[in-house]
Image (cartoon, rainbow, N blue to C red):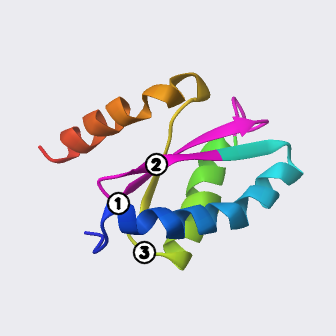
Amino acid sequence: MIPFSDEDLMPAVEKSIEKIRPMLALDGGNITLLGVKGGKVFVSLGGACVGCSASGNTLKYGVERQLRIDIHPEIEVINIAPDLAENWEEIAKKIIGEEGK
């Protein structure tokens, strides 16, 4: 369990994401922080990351790894497809609700 509220996590997550963004940009990718809900970080990978076969690795071994180093070892990052990004909060509620069962 992450010992911080979603509101407390937001500034730290934003700062960490800014460290990651240049790495993604080198390969034509981008990342948008959608928000934090239930201690999980919701992002949307964009640019060249969309449809890239390595995007899952980028998410886990790049983005999530950096957030775990910077913030907390149990933090989890979830990618929401760009076309669903505006509905990320509804998706987050479903994900968090399913894990609580």
Residue 90 sits above or below residue 79 on the image: above
Residues in magenta, as a range = 32-53
Distance (Cα) linking label 3 and label 2? 18 Å
Residue 32 sits above or below residue 16 on the image: above
Distance (Cα) linking label 2 and label 1? 9 Å
Where is residue 51? Give x, y as percent.
69, 29
Where is residue 27? Give x, y as percent.
86, 47
In the rendered image, which residue does mark 1 sit on?
6
Mark 2: amino acid: Gly
In the rendered image, which residue does mark 3 sit on?
73
In the rendered image, which residue does mark 2 sit on?
35
Secondary structure type for disc 2: strand
Mark 3: amino acid: Pro
| Residue under the point 28% across and 75% down | 3
Residue 22 sits above or below residue 88 on the image: below
Secondary structure type for disc 1: helix
